[in-house]
Amino acid sequence: MRKKIELTDRAARKRIMETFGVSSMSLSLALNYKRNSDTCKKMRKMALDNGGVMMQEITQK
């Protein structure tokens, strides 16, 4: 199962990047659960609080 957070609002993405002082690549890695630091967890929470949607892809065997 793969999960990610979809955040299409550019203003919200920019706010998160400015708040945490990260690049768009770092934010993307955090929202796609490729990184799991405390900062990434905070960015994901902020994304969900600002209109982000949790997506889960379930693969069948």
Image: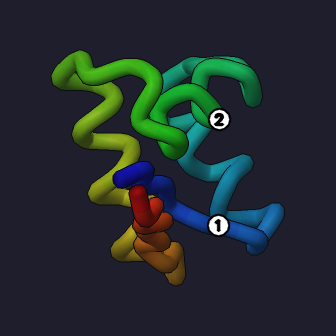
Q: In which quarter of the image is residue 46?
A: bottom left
**Which residue shows up at 43% across the image and 65% down it?**
60
Q: Quadrant of the C terminus?
A: bottom left
Depth check, front residue: 20 or 43: 43
SS class of the residue under badge 2? helix
**Which residue shows up at 59% across the image and 33% down it?**
27
SS class of the residue under badge 1? loop
Q: Mark 2 points at which residue?
A: 28
Query: Mark 2 is on which residue type?
Result: Ser
Q: Mark 1 points at which residue?
A: 7
36 lies left or right of 19: left
Q: Where is residue 32 in the image (x, y as percent from the top left)?
A: 52, 41
Query: Mark 1 is on which residue type?
Result: Leu
Checking the image for residue 20, the label placed there is none
Q: Where is residue 25 in the image (x, y as percent from the top left)?
A: 73, 22
- Label 2 vs label 1: CA separation? 10 Å
Q: Position of residue 57 (x, y in %)?
A: 49, 65
Q: Which of marks 2 and 1 is nearer the N terminus?
A: 1
